[in-house]
Amino acid sequence: MGYGKWIGGIMGFMTMGPLGALAGFAIGSLFDKSVTAQEEMDGGYGSTAQEDVYTGQRNSFLFSMLVMASYIIRADGRIMHSEMEFVRQFLRVNFGEASVSEGERILLNLFEQRKRMEQNDPSAFRRTIRECGAQIAANLTYEQRLQLLDFLVKIAQSDGNVCAAEVDALKEVAQSMQLSMQEVDSMLNLRGDSLEDAYKVLEIEPTASDEEVRKAYRNLVLKHHPDRVATLGEDIRKAAEEKLQRINDAKERIFKARGMK
């Protein structure tokens, strides 16, 4: 699979702004130079306008995830094998084996670009991440941004420990994408099995009334419903289904503890 076809074809909103600048460095050097790759970049053979929009949206989502992942992975100053392997497995499952080395190369290029940017200004890449977050917020729906955040949280959790620096980075990225700190805490606790974790998932305090619990759960179901990210592809939708199941599990723990039905 050529790089142009996988992610460089129809780039959607990431062809401009700070994401476009990073894409030029991280992806540009990987493009196939053949005529075929150039035609893929122009939309491919026989693609419709609707297919182009779909591909552009999906590719932009994917590259946005890789950009933000590059920030989360380096938050503690290290590049952990487990975190890189999580990204590899995500690409392998959703885009096929050929995409694994391509995605890894893009990540490594992003790490290199960060090093270059920070040589003269230690805050340069951080500012770029914030600007990318603003671009993402302007072009992805609220529900799509929540799903992107969910992937980033899973990357941070992949080594079995989320350090304070990673939590701070997740909250910084979330804020730049116009998501709340409560939403970060909610996703960080999705895999927990305690009652305390369950309240954090539902973004409420243990002192909340039964009606407030029900309302919080209904709101979560609406904003995390898989259908709201279906346009990004069946694989992304399935990931949202898994997230919703964990929300349901948290609700059930609270309902059981309170004797609610």
Image: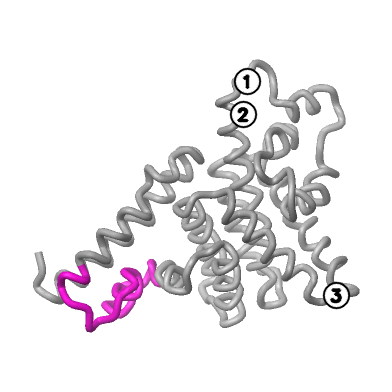
Identify the residue under disc 3. 121
Characterize the local packing of mark 3: few (<14), some (14-19) or many (20 or more) Cα atoms within 10 angstroms: few
Q: Is residue 144 above or below residue 158?
A: above
Label 1 SS: loop
Q: Which mark is residue 52?
A: 2
Q: Which mark is residue 171?
A: none
Circle 2/circle 1 CB separation < 8 Å: yes
Could you classify mark 2 by the number of other residues whose Cα lies within 10 Å: few (under 14), some (14-19), or many (20 or more)? some
The residue singled out by tag 1 in the image is 47
Residue at mark 1 to residue at mark 3: CA–CA distance: 43 Å
Where in the figure is residue 120, as x and y percent of width and height? 90, 74
With 131 as the anchor, is 38 left or right in this view? right
**Segment colored magenta:** 189-213
Instruction: Say if 248 sits above or below 258 in the image.
Output: above
Q: Is residue 191 in the magenta section?
A: yes
Of 241 and 129, which appears nearest the observer? 129
Q: Earlier in the sequence, mark 2 or mark 1?
A: 1
